[in-house]
Image: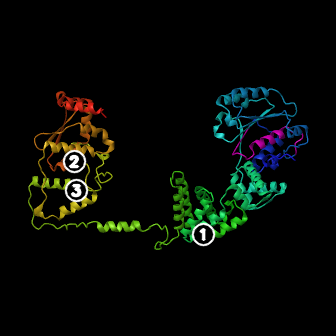
Amino acid sequence: MEEYIVSARKYRPLSFDTVVGQQALTQTLKNAVKSGKLAHAYLFCGPRGVGKTTCARIFAKAINCQSPTADGEACNQCESCRSFNEQRSLNIFELDAASNNSVEHIKTLMEQTRIPPQLGKYKAFIIDEVHMLSTAAFNAFLKTLEEPPAHVIFILATTEKHKILPTILSRCQIYDFDRMTVQGIVDHLKGVAEKEGFTYDVEALNIIAEKADGGMRDALSIFDQCASFCQGNITYQKVIEDLNVLDSENYFNIIDLSLENKVSDIMVLLNGIINNGFDAGQLVLGLAKHVRNVLMAKDESTLPLLEVSERQCERYKEQAKKADTRFLYQALRIANQCDINYRQSNNKRLLVELTLIEIAQITQADDSVGVGRRPRRLKSLFKKLVQRQQPEVKRAPQVAPAVPVVREEKKEEEVKAAVSASSYSAESRPRLKGGGFSWGALRTGPSASSTPVIDAPSADNTKTETANAADAPKGNTPQVDNAQFTQDELEIMWLSMCNRMPPQYSAISLRMKNIIPRLLEMPNIEILAENQIILDQLQAIKGSIVNTLRRDLKNESIEVILRLAEQHEKVRILSDIEVFDQMNEKNPAVGRLREVFNLELA
């Protein structure tokens, strides 16, 4: 029985002309061989399976050919070419940097460069996966790479150029290999299938080319797998069954059903796909790619972007005539959003079902009722409902008084203070989420009347209060509150104010909780700061403290006096253990209770 060789090795190119998909690079290398203008170091980089190592071998053979052809190809007839084809050439060395990446390996390589070639002009050193070399090995390689002997040429190959030191890159001619196109892979697979005597469907070869993701070596490996499964008759159905690829017919059906708003049929189709073992996430990815292809098929100028067979291209064009461009844009956006959220979702199937439902409802009329319909008018109805529930605010007509009213200056100032304390303009008052005051907008200064209060009323309530004040009769002018309060009420309101302070003021609020304000002669309040830092912080927010206490204690005459505490006025803050010790001294039963229940302080 003849020894079996996989297609990736059996049909490996032996000349520049047989290399697939890299015409620009191979032509450059042929011109270099033909003209004899050879660099001392080359770097071939690109994705896997696109021909980097293959081109390096062909190039190494061509530069040592004793009678190259007119276009720069090796003759395959001279002794140098025959020795290379029979894998006994002493002028071409291959090194796998993945397993030979130490300084010792590079030094051994450097020693071999000193020996001149026995046959031919050059010694070619092919270093594959060169990015795997260690930093020390790269540094040891630098000098030889920059100024090698005249008979040495280095050909480096890598899939990750960004991992190579810039000092190495600057010493090489860099050739970037392209990914294989789907059509290029299909054409090459056709030739392989004809040489092997296989029958094939073009759609089946397209599936193999798409699965290879731009790598010819991967495409040939998948081709061998499918050929074994199909027993020489490579058909579309057998290929998608062997590779576990979802049939594109499902995507056409989903779009057709979505255009008809048939959500129930789509759910049944999805259930069948999942029951057959296909991943719902791959379905979304495939659907997004399908929608993209339909969108490209709407314009003749973008048809070349479809990497599919002619029969599939015609089907895309037929569906593009039925699908509106807006529908395709929306479906593509929804599918992309599902792909972004799929990995983080705990209920992946539900996410995919909701995605398909949204796609199916894109073209549904607003007044139609269907399964899974999203309430599109909810937002506008909700706004009308809120507007209907809000009380109407009546504006007082501005009528000039017939008889001038003489008021006392003090009375007029009190009325203005009362109105300013009960109403604030929405434009000038900073807001906190939920209607409170934003401490980030505090103003410093001695004037308390111009500074907002904590948890100020909302703008809507302000407008209502202002309107009510305007509607009030002239004889019922609201009086300024001057309610009396006790020391206990002051301490309660003080602690409540500290608890309402925003998180960014947590430090000063904690310090304020340890301060006990003192009620002096009504309504003056004294606050003692333990040190100058706390005093400065309190001075910065004094205006808001005053306004808040005036509102909560219902006394517009409150004044706050801030001063630094004397040494004898400072109260040391006790720890939890010290507080417990004091309680135990006053009541020994507390200590006995702790011992009986074996309690510990938290």
Residue at label 3? 423
| Secondary structure under the numbered disc 2 in the rendered image | helix
On whether residue 357 falls in the magenta region, the answer is no
View extreme (bottom): residue: 367
Q: Identify residue type, mark 1.
A: Asp
Residue 109 lies in quadrant: top right
Residue 563: tell me if it is visible.
yes
Query: Between tags 1 and 2, which lies in front?
Result: 1
Q: Is 566 placed left or right of 240 in the picture?
A: left
Query: Alpha-carbon distance for marks 1 and 3?
Result: 60 Å
Residue displayed at 22% across by 32% down: 590
**Residue 256 numbered mark, or none:** 1
Residue at label 2? 548
Query: Alpha-carbon distance for marks 3 and 2?
Result: 14 Å
Q: Identify residue type, mark 2.
A: Thr
Q: Earlier in the sequence, mark 1 or mark 3?
A: 1
Q: Is 161 placed left or right of 62 in the picture?
A: left
Residue 585 lies in quadrant: top left
In the image shown, does 160 or 212 lie closer to the viewer? 212
